[in-house]
Image: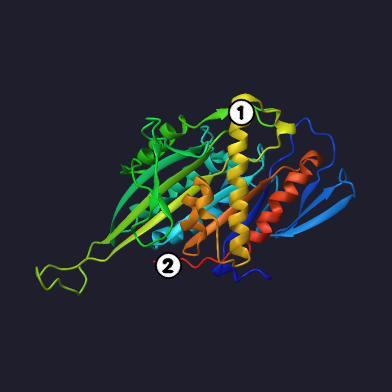
């Protein structure tokens, strides 16, 4: 089945991280051109070479600024127009997802999508004299199938309930929302939330995310000038209001127990991570094939992603892959999901 038109489907991007310094072999995963990735797998039973087409390929020379301008900025455009916009990162452990999405290590040039979106959002708002904006942030992690508020750090689990705003899907009704006056305020909340994320060292990744991170930015926009309409009961002028929602998700990386050598608590975490990612893949498959039943309810991750994937959001998926031959199998698996996601329809509504 062919991909839908670009403006009517999920936009899909591939990012190939730089090879690790200790790697001496030729890269298995490479950029063929701006829209094609090739993966050679000489370790397979039958040596193979696969090619995948996406909307854009970012190779090892691409910067986080390049990724934000190509992926993040267009999604922010939709949010400021009153739509739901989503940016999702997917890939195996250690492939560069968190660096692309959340990096905030003090090097401005290496800032990830979240810090760049925060600065860009308030820059645009500051120069828009036609509207008054109210901006708020919420941040949760999904750890072992439990949603936990990162801004309060209470440790209490949050319950997913059906959304009441007509956008469809689920929301965490009891999560904390913090109003933000400027980018410094938003980033302060983001940094406090990030300190509560759960990381651990595994054989595959020295700083492995053990949970999925979900950040929400709500943007309410009200016209400064009264419209021509008047409330008949009060005689007051009516104002035009739009609400946009930005959803940014850094999914924990898939990992094979044999490679990560996870045991005990780490193995239990990996089991939950892989299970939720399997459900995510099943959801993408069902949507791509236009199946009647889509298993959104089978994991907490996909419950919260229903409004991003059910066709009413401007959504971008960044699939991060590692270039080394030893990761060729995982790269192929990730890019196969990317190919299916190219067929998931998405027509955002205001």
Q: Position of residue 350 (x, y in %)?
A: 39, 66
The residue sitting at 46% across, 57% down in the picture is: 307
- The residue to which callout 2 is attached is 349
Tell which circle, 1 or 2, labels the residue nearer the N-terminal end.
1
Q: Position of residue 219 (x, y in %)?
A: 35, 54
Q: Regarding mark 2 in the picture, which secondary structure is present there?
A: loop
For the residue pair 235 and 148, the one nearer the viewer reads as 148
Marking on residue 222: none
The residue sitting at 45% across, 60% down in the picture is: 77
The residue sitting at 49% across, 32% down in the picture is: 197
Give the quarter of the figure containing the N terminus: bottom right
As displayed, is residue 164 above or below residue 203? below
Q: Is residue 99 at all visible to an observer of this figure?
A: no
- The residue to which callout 1 is attached is 266
Disc 1/disc 2 C-alpha distance (Å): 41 Å
The residue sitting at 78% across, 40% down in the picture is: 324
Q: Position of residue 338 (x, y in %)?
A: 66, 56
Q: Is residue 159 left or right of residue 231?
A: right
For the residue pair 147 and 224, the one nearer the viewer reads as 147
The answer to which quarter of the image holds residue 233 is: bottom left
Q: Residues within 10 Å of mark 2 (few under 14, many from 20)?
A: some
Q: Regarding mark 1 in the picture, which secondary structure is present there?
A: helix
């Amino acid at each position: 089945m062919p991909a839908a038109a670009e403006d009517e489907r999920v936009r899909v991007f591939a990012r190939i991280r730089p090879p690790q310094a200790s790697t001496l072999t030729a890269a298995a995963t490479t950029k063929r051109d701006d829209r094609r990735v090739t993966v050679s797998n000489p370790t397979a039973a039958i040596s193979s070479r696969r090619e995948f087409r996406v909307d854009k390929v970012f190779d090892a020379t691409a910067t986080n600024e390049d990724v934000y301008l190509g992926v993040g900025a267009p999604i922010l455009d939709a949010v400021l127009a009153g739509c739901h916009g989503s940016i999702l990162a997917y890939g195996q452990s250690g492939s560069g997802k968190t660096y692309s999405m959340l990096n905030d290590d003090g090097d401005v040039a290496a800032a990830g999508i979240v810090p760049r979106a925060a600065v860009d959002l308030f820059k645009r708002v500051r120069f828009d004299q036609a509207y008054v904006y109210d901006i708020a942030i919420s941040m949760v992690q999904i750890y072992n199938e439990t949603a936990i508020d990162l801004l309060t750090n209470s440790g209490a689990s949050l319950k997913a309930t059906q959304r009441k705003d007509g956008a469809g899907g689920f929301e965490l009704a009891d999560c904390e929302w913090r109003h933000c006056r400027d980018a410094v305020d938003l980033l302060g909340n983001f940094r406090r939330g990030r300190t509560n994320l759960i990381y651990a060292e595994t054989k595959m990744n020295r700083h492995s995310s053990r949970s999925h991170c979900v950040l929400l930015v709500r943007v309410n926009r009200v016209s400064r000038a009264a419209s021509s309409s008047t409330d008949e009961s009060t005689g007051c002028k009516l104002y035009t209001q739009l609400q946009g929602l930005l959803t940014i998700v850094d999914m924990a990386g898939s990992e094979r127990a044999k490679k990560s050598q996870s045991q005990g608590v780490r193995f239990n975490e990996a089991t939950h991570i892989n299970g939720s990612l399997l459900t995510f893949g099943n959801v993408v498959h069902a949507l791509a094939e236009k199946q009647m039943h889509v298993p959104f309810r089978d994991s907490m991750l996909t419950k919260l992603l229903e409004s991003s994937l059910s066709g009413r959001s401007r959504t971008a998926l960044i699939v991060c892959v590692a270039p080394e031959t030893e990761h060729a199998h995982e790269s192929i698996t990730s890019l196969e999901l990317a190919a299916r996601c190219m067929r998931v329809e998405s027509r955002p509504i205001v």
